Each structure stands twice: as C-alpha cells, then as structure tokens.
Amino acid sequence: MKIKWLGHSSFLLTESTGISVLTDPFDSEMVGYSFCPPPSVDIVTMSHGHADHNHLKGVKSYKQMYDTAGKFEYEGRVHITGIQAFHDDCEGKERGKNVIYKFGMDGVSVCHMGDIGEPCSPELIERLLPVDVLMIPVGGNYTVDAELAKEYVDRLMPQIVIPMHYKLKHCELDIDKVEPFTRLFDDELVQEDLDELDLDRSDFDGNEATKVVVLNRQKF
C-alpha cells in the first residue's frame, strides 16, 4: 500500500490493487492553504463535521463515503473500522465527537486518529490495538498536543507514526508546528522529506522502535 499526505489530516491511501481511500478532506479557505485531491477516489472517510475535515464537495469523484462508527468492507480488499471517540477532554461537551478510523489494507493496520482530543485511556487503547501505522494530530489547541500525542504513541507502539494537523506555512489555524513532537524522539528515529510511503506486511515483521515519518505535502 502507498500513503501520501495532502495536508492537515488528509491522506491518500492506495491499496495494491488500486483501491484508494481519502481521509478528512479540508476546506482550503478555513485551513489557509490549498486542498488538491486526486481526480477520483473510491472511498472518503470523515472523522467529524468540521470544515477542515469534512469538505466533501472539494472531492471531485468518489464511490463510497463513511462518517460514522462501525465496521465496513470495500470489495473484500479494504476493511474499515470506525471507533467513536471525543474531540475534547470533556466527553464532547466543547467540540463534540470524533471518529477514529482503522484501515486494514495489504495486511497493514493503519489508524487515523482524526481530531482526537480525549485523554489516552486504557479502554480506548484496547479498542485501537493493534496498530502498525499511526496518523495522529500533534498541533494541540483543538486536539491533543505533542506530549499527549507521544503518550498515544508510547501506548499503541506502532512501528511508524505520521504526524498530522500541525502548522505549515500559510496555515491560519491556531496550532503548533511539528517540531515539538519530533523533538520527543531520538534523531535517528525521525525521517523527513519523504513524498510517500510504500508498505506491505513484510515491513512490520520485526520489533523495531517506532519511527516518525514526516511526509511532504502532495498535490495532484
């Protein structure tokens, strides 16, 4: 499977037969920089109803959309589990609910945390495990910050973590940059300046330490 980052919390996941999943399409006017999705995708997932995560009209063509908790399957190749969580640390009273999506593709378990804001509890960790690739917000304010994101990483123990929802040039949201998060890891565990990841099950057969992969934003 291949993973590309389109900015903010939006990723393009492509399974080996070509089935594509787009996560959390965003409104360019709200985020402050352009959203450039591919011409067409098979699946769109949206973690919650805020414009920087549910801009479906910005997606040119799609076949299936998921925005709720539950178990879903697409053509017997892509398995999706939506897990209900909260956008804040007071059970949704401030910012509502958030759906965490787990994707099973090519034998790899990918977990997209959406705008997770709730504390890292044993109950939630148990519902999320196992995780090979973790996509987690690190910018704080509206979500967990760098330190809380690191706690999720330590508890879920993915082999790869991809930070998202952090401040880039022209971003108008009041969130932090990625560096406070990457500084929490040893330098040799941080990989930067990658355009995409190309993964299969064999990449996760070892017990290596978690690697942080900071992807370049891609445009189509």
Image (cartoon, grey):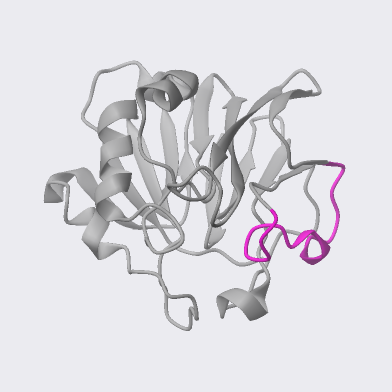
Position of residue 104 relative to residue 37, above or below, is above
Residue 199: image location, x then y, percent: 47, 32
Position of residue 98 relative to residue 25, above or below, is above
- Most foreground residue, 134 or 125: 125
Horizontal relation, residue 156 to residue 134: left or right = left
Position of residue 121 relative to residue 13, above or below, is above
Residue 157 in view, yes or no: no
The answer to which quarter of the image holds residue 204 is top left
The answer to which quarter of the image holds residue 219 is bottom right
- Most foreground residue, 122 or 78: 122
Horizontal relation, residue 65 to residue 22: left or right = right
Asked if residue 51 is among those painted magenta in the image, a careful observer would answer: yes
* Main secondary structure along the magenta-highlighted residues: loop
Asked if residue 91 is among those painted magenta in the image, a careful observer would answer: no
Which residue does the image show at 65% across and 75% down from the upper left?
28
Which residue does the image show at 64% across and 39% down from the upper left?
14
Residue 145: image location, x then y, percent: 33, 56
| Total count of labels | 0
Residue 80: image location, x then y, percent: 67, 27
Give the residues drawn in magenta, as a range.
49-64
Residue 62 in view, yes or no: yes
The answer to which quarter of the image holds residue 15 is top right
Residue 50: image location, x then y, percent: 66, 61
Quarter of the image with the N terminus in it: top right
Quarter of the image with the C terminus in it: bottom right
Which residue does the image show at 54% across and 57% down from the upper left?
94
Which residue does the image show at 55% across and 63% down from the upper left?
218
